Every structure is written in C-alpha cells, then in structure tokens.
Amino acid sequence: MQDPAALLSSVFGFDSFRPGQQDIVQAVCDGRDVLAIMPTGGGKSLCYQLPALARDGVTLVVSPLIALMRDQVRALREAGVAAGALTSASDAEETEEIFRALDDGRLKLLYMAPERLARAGTARLLERVKPTLIAVDEAHCVSQWGHDFRPDYLEIGKLRARLGVQLAAFTATADEETREEITQRLFGAPPQVFLRGFDRPNLHLAFRPKDKPREQLLRFVDARKGQSGIVYCASRARTETLADALNKAGHTALAYHAGMDPDARRLAETRFQREDGLIVCATVAFGMGVDKPDIRYVAHADLPKSIEAYYQEIGRAGRDGDPAETLTLYGPDDIRLRRAQVDEGLAPAERKEADHGRLNALLGLAETPWCRRRALLSYFGESPEGDCGACDICDEKPETHDATVAAQKAFSA
Ligand code: ADP
Ligand code: MG
C-alpha cells in the first residue's frame, strides 16, 4: 500500500488534506466500509481516488452523471492516473482500451454509469476483474424518497453482496432518514459513518487591517496572557523578531520555522505540547504534527496564502471544543507578497490561477461586511441559517437587529 499523504501531493498537487479527508481516506485504506457525509466542495472525490491509487487492483466508481464522470476521468488521466469510464457515451474504441487495461491489471479506477450495472455483460466483467473497492458517489441517489432517486442505484447493493467487496459511499445529504436508507440499501452491515460539516462554532473569527501590527498583536496576546497560542508569520525572520518582542513584553514565546535545525524544532514542539501558556511564533512549517487540544488562540501576524490555509491554520485552535480566538492581520504588502509568491512559483498556469482564486477568496473574507462565518462556510459550500454571533462583524452589530432583544430592552426601559 502506498502512502496516501505522499500521493496527495505527488499526484494531485495538494499540500494538505481538507478537513475530514484524512480520517476517511485512512478508514477506506484500512479496508472498512464507510459512509461519508461532507458538504459540497468538501473534496469527497479525493476520499476514494486516493485509496484507489494507494492499493492494488481496480476500484469501481459509480457516479450518476456522465458529464461528471468524464470530467474526473480526464483530470485523473492528466495527472497520469490510469482511469476510464464505461458509459453510454463511450465509443467502441474507448471501451476496447478500457477492457485491455483491465485485463492487463493496469486500470486503477473504473467509472461506471449506474444504468450499466444491471446489464448482463457487466456482471461477467466485474466477476472477472474483481474490483477491490466499490465507491458510490452521490450515494443519496439510492434513496427512493430523495429528489435525485436513480433506480439503477439499487443494483449497487446487490453487486456488493455478490462480489463480497468493500464499499465506500459519499454524499452531501446529511439528513437522518437518507442516511439510514443508504445504509440499508448499500451495505451489508452498518458502515463507519463520517459526518462532518465545516463549522467550528467555538472559534471566534476576526480580521483587522494592519495599522501598527506589532502593537495590535501585542494587545491581542496581552489580553490572553498565560494561554497557549500560535502566531503565524509569513517569514522566518518575522517569527524570530516577534518571539523576541513577546518575550520582552513578559510572555514566553518560541520561534519555529523550517530553517531551524531538527533538534530545536522538536524541542519547540514538545515544549508547546507539554507546557501551559507557551506561544509559538511560526511559519506554516508548524502545524502538521501539532495535536494539542487546548490551543486557545491562533493569530496571523500576516495574511495566510489562501482561504484553505487560513481555515486549516485557525482550525488548530480549540480542538477541545472550548472557546478559542483567532485574529488575522493583513495589509497591502501582504497581498502583494502573496500574489508574487503565486506568480513566481513553479506551478503550471491553471494551478496558479486556482491559487490566485483561493487568495482572492481569503481577501473577500477579510473585507466582507457580513458575518464572517457565513462567508467562510459558503466558500465551502454550506449555507448556514443565520449570522453566527461569534465573529468581529457580528460583535459590532447593534443588538437591535435581534427583535426579541430589542423588545426586551423596550419593555425593561
Ligand atoms: P465534492 O465532491 O465533495 O463536492 P470535490 O471532490 O469535487 O468535492 O472537490 C472540490 C474541489 O476541492 C475540487 O476542485 C478539488 O480539486 C478540491 N480539493 C479537494 N481536496 C483538496 C485538498 N486536499 N486541497 C485542495 N483542494 C482540494
Ligand atoms: Mg462530488
């Protein structure tokens, strides 16, 4: 089995997992049946594509839309992955080529339109090639009461039973009834369920334009003296100057960046893990291995590189579920620096365009006049009902926006 984290960057060019992806990938790689519910845009495809690449044999992917399937196959092939789709849109030559790749054991992902599952030839084909995993995308299509019901999806459960093979199902539809129906129709025994929205309600979100950045940051940290926190910086030099400044102001701060020798890095990691009230001023090199539940704040002394990086980095605070604070400082120099980093990077043109898009999404979040959590979650495809009441923008809103509070005030006056 190959290391999925390594494939994430070598094949897909991503430097980190999206929230929830890693656990799902791990469970699928471990051979468990999985039902994963993740919001649209959360990155479900990767959760079956990575395990498919990591393991031996071919993974059968059932997906309801031919256009989506072909799109994924094209993207996978461009990334050098042996993938193919059998749909009503495949011509004879394409089908021939897929059969050849299957027989040679070369194919890693076989996408199949659901209406193909019930065909006699398909059963024979699948008995012969014996997929090691069935991945069901848009698994809510198996629900007869749902809006996207596809009768052919009912074949999948039978196929799984006949082949006796592991199954992983994915959907963005989280309601209880649909979940139960999926479990009942697709799986033999209850699968491991991953249900994960993007909201982290205990994280307070705030952005501030840089004015006097060092003072702004000191003020923020002073107000949280004795708490454990991370201050992310855009450069190695800045981690050191900020750590100095914090130490001079009576805090205990350590610098951390990839230029330090490994022993010093490890020491900083263990101290942060074990001691209370330590501050680490770090570049993005700090984080992957940090699993401290009671980090009470994450401050960004400089703008992160993208909305994904931002989410990932603030997400390290408050893993214990208790309230945690975040503050992101940004200025025109940061924006120029981040743009230049994208432009000067070695990534191909489309990747650069996407990186600019993710940076711009973060700037949109920094400058939004509305609830930040709503803006952040809507980027990830969620649509929360109301404003969060736990971001700097909600804090500043006059309370009269809330009719009941306004009414109470009027009565008690
Ligand atoms: P879903 O099926 O959950 O709606 P997709 O699998 O289509 O989401 O992924 C949505 C987008 O997120 C795609 O553009 C994909 O390339 C991107 N994506 C997925 N995982 C990652 C990751 N770990 N890092 C960066 N981008 C990712
Ligand atoms: Mg999808």
Image: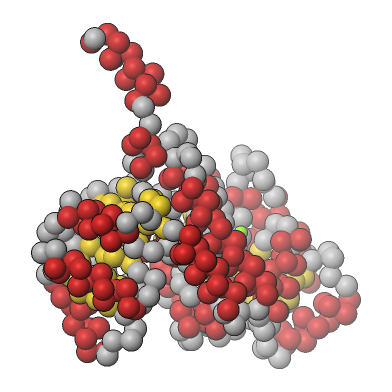
At a point 59% along the width and 65% down the height, the residue shown is 356
Residue 283 location in percent, x, y? 35, 74
Residue 190 location in percent, x, y? 43, 57
Residue 68 location in percent, x, y? 71, 61
Q: Is residue 188 visible?
A: no
Residue 83 location in percent, x, y? 69, 78
Classify residue 403 by image quadrant. Answer: top left
At a point 24% along the width and 53% down the height, the residue shown is 220
At a point 69% along the width and 68% down the height, the residue shown is 72
Along the viewing direction, whichever of 57 and 75 lies nearer the viewer: 75
- Residue 350 as seen in the image, left or right of residue 382: right
State which quarter of the image contains the C terminus: top left
> Is residue 269 positioned above or below 318 on the image?
below
**Given the current orientation, which residue lies at the most extreme right position?**
92
Along the viewing direction, whichever of 99 and 46 lies nearer the viewer: 46
Q: Is residue 102 visible?
A: yes
> Is residue 37 positioned above or below 312 on the image?
above
- Residue 51 as seen in the image, left or right of residue 353: left
- Residue 163 as seen in the image, left or right of residue 247: right
Q: How is the image coloured?
A: secondary structure
Question: Total number of numbered labels?
Answer: 0
Classify residue 66 by image quadrant. Answer: bottom right
Along the viewing direction, whichever of 373 and 137 lies nearer the viewer: 373
